[in-house]
């Protein structure tokens, strides 16, 4: 299945300039600020302001920003009705993709691609995606409706909407932290999708809907859910080694159908994803409250084996799985939480693309049949 031809999957290809985020093999920065610094010293609201407006906010700017995001959590009644009417078995990522598309129908500025309008829509989308996911939690898990508190962090508000009760202080802070870690990552598959759609001068809601579709896959955002299902499949820390050996035996026996170990590997970080280390420690801290130590124990064991035997490091989705599980969040909501964060990075890139646009249209190497002529249908065998 894997085609390791140079450039396959656009690996190593520089596809453009960006001032939003910088990913190197050893670092991640949002507009110049290191991710560890932001994770420790900022909130998601501040980081979202940084990504969208270019600078960290002052106290006054932050208060206004929070008010605007919070106000946007009141969805148009038509969108609320449409979400409630979706089949129960709709994957929540599909619900969010459709919800964002529908939100475009009711946004008076949907077709306005000016910077000022794009900025306003970006802020609205942060509130709206959280509200749509909160509404889905009511439908999906039957939780109580919770109104977000403009004085609380976005993470605490989102968590309270997902659980139908006020978020605990530690869990709220950790969820907010994961939103910071997930907010931006340069030209990853979903952001590149958003930029490609934008490059045709299409609208922001189309670009974000497309990005959600790209994020859904298990090789991208879907990995946090897949990692938690893997932990549940392993069951207990003492099963890790046998489980790992069984996967290796399967891969040896079926080289054309290898099983991936979800939450490991990265296109750029071949020596480790430092977001994963930050989140692992937050999740470890949460176990002091939840007492759920076995997931972390299992994760650490599997991580050690992967490093020793395969030299592959975990990515952010790996600790996100056991952190979200400890919070009691239903697994199908993990990747949608990623949307509620990454929508910020997507919108920052969409605005950057509008500002310095050239249609994204690469070329390909043709490997199909040589030139031939159409045989009339009655003569075809
Ligand atoms: N489990 C087992 N083996 C893995 C692996 C994983 N999670 N990730 C990479 N590898 C192996 C590959 O099979 C490949 O081995 P090979 O050379 O013998 O074929 C080698 O490591 C290099 O990986 P490659 O497929 O070239 O990396 P990539 O840059 O194309 O893909 C990912 C990166 C993220 C798509 C890939 O690591 C993956 O599928 N990870 C699991 C899904 C995941 O966690 N996604 C979230 C990404 S943030």
Image (tube, helix red, strand yellow):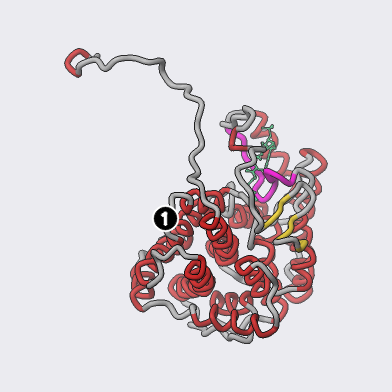
Q: Residue at x 40, y 62 (%)?
A: 101
Is residue 136 covered in magenta? Answer: no
User: Callout 1: few (<14), some (14-19), or many (20+) C-alpha neighbours within 10 Å?
Assistant: some
Is residue 260 covered in magenta? Answer: yes
Asked if one can make out residue 288 in the rendered structure from this viewpoint, the answer is yes
Residue at mark 1: C-beta within 8 A of ligand 1: no
The answer to whether 71 is drawn above or below residue 379 in the figure is below
Quadrant placement of the N terminus: top right
Over which residues does the magenta segment extend? 257-269
Q: Residue at x 29, y 15 (%)?
A: 373
Q: Quadrant of ligand 1?
A: top right
What is the magenta segment's predominant secondary structure? loop
| Residue 25 vs residue 255, the one in the foreground | 25
Q: How many marks?
A: 1
| Among the 4 quarters of the image, the one containing residue 37 | bottom right
Residue 145 appears left or right of 372: right
Asked if one can make out residue 137 in the rendered structure from this viewpoint, the answer is no
The answer to whether 370 is drawn above or below residue 318 in the figure is above
Q: Residue at x 60, y 61 (%)?
A: 345
Q: Residue at x 51, y 70 (%)?
A: 116
Where does residue 381 sit, x and y in percent of width and height? Answer: 24, 14
Where does residue 19 sit, x and y in percent of width and height? Answer: 66, 56
Where does residue 58 sit, x and y in percent of width and height? Answer: 70, 80
Residue 121 appears left or right of 35: left
Q: Which residue is mark 1?
A: 202
Where does residue 207 sit, x and y in percent of width and height? Answer: 46, 56
Residue 88 appears left or right of 47: left
Q: Secondary structure at mark 1?
A: loop
């Amino acid at each position: 299945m894997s085609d390791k031809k140079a450039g396959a999957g656009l690996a190593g290809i520089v596809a453009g300039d960006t001032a939003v985020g910088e990913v190197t093999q050893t670092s991640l920065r949002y507009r110049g600020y290191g991710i560890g610094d932001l994770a420790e010293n900022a909130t998601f609201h501040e980081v979202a302001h940084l990504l969208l407006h270019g600078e960290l906010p002052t106290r006054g700017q932050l208060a206004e920003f929070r008010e605007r995001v919070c106000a946007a959590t009141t969805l148009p009644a038509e969108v609320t009705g449409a979400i409630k009417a979706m089949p129960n078995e709709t994957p929540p990522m599909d619900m969010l993709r459709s919800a964002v598309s529908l939100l475009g129908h009711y946004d008076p500025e949907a077709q306005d691609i000016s910077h000022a309008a794009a900025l306003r829509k970006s802020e609205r989308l942060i509130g709206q995606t959280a509200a749509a996911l909160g509404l889905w939690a009511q439908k999906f898990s039957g939780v109580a409706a919770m109104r977000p508190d403009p004085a609380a962090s976005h993470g605490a508000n989102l968590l309270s909407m997902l659980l139908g009760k006020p978020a605990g202080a530690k869990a709220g802070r950790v969820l907010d932290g994961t939103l910071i870690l997930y907010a931006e990552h340069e030209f990853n598959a979903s952001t590149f999708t958003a930029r490609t759609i934008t490059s045709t001068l299409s609208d922001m809601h189309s670009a974000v809907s497309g990005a959600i579709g790209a994020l859904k896959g298990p090789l991208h955002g879907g990995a946090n859910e897949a990692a938690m299902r893997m932990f549940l499949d392993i069951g207990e820390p003492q099963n890790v080694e046998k489980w790992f050996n069984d996967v290796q035996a399967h891969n040896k026996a079926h080289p054309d159908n290898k099983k991936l170990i979800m939450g490991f590997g990265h296109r750029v970080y071949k020596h480790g994803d430092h977001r994963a280390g930050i989140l692992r420690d937050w999740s470890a801290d949460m176990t002091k409250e939840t007492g759920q130590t076995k997931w972390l124990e299992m994760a650490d064991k599997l991580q050690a084996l992967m490093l020793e035997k395969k030299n592959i490091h975990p990515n952010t989705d790996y600790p996100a799985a056991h952190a979200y599980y400890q919070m009691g969040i239903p697994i199908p909501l993990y990747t949608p939480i990623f949307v509620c964060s990454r929508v910020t990075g997507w919108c920052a890139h969409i605005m950057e693309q509008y500002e310095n646009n050239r249609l994204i249209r690469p070329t390909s190497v043709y490997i199909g049949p040589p030139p031939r002529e159409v045989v009339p249908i009655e003569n075809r065998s």
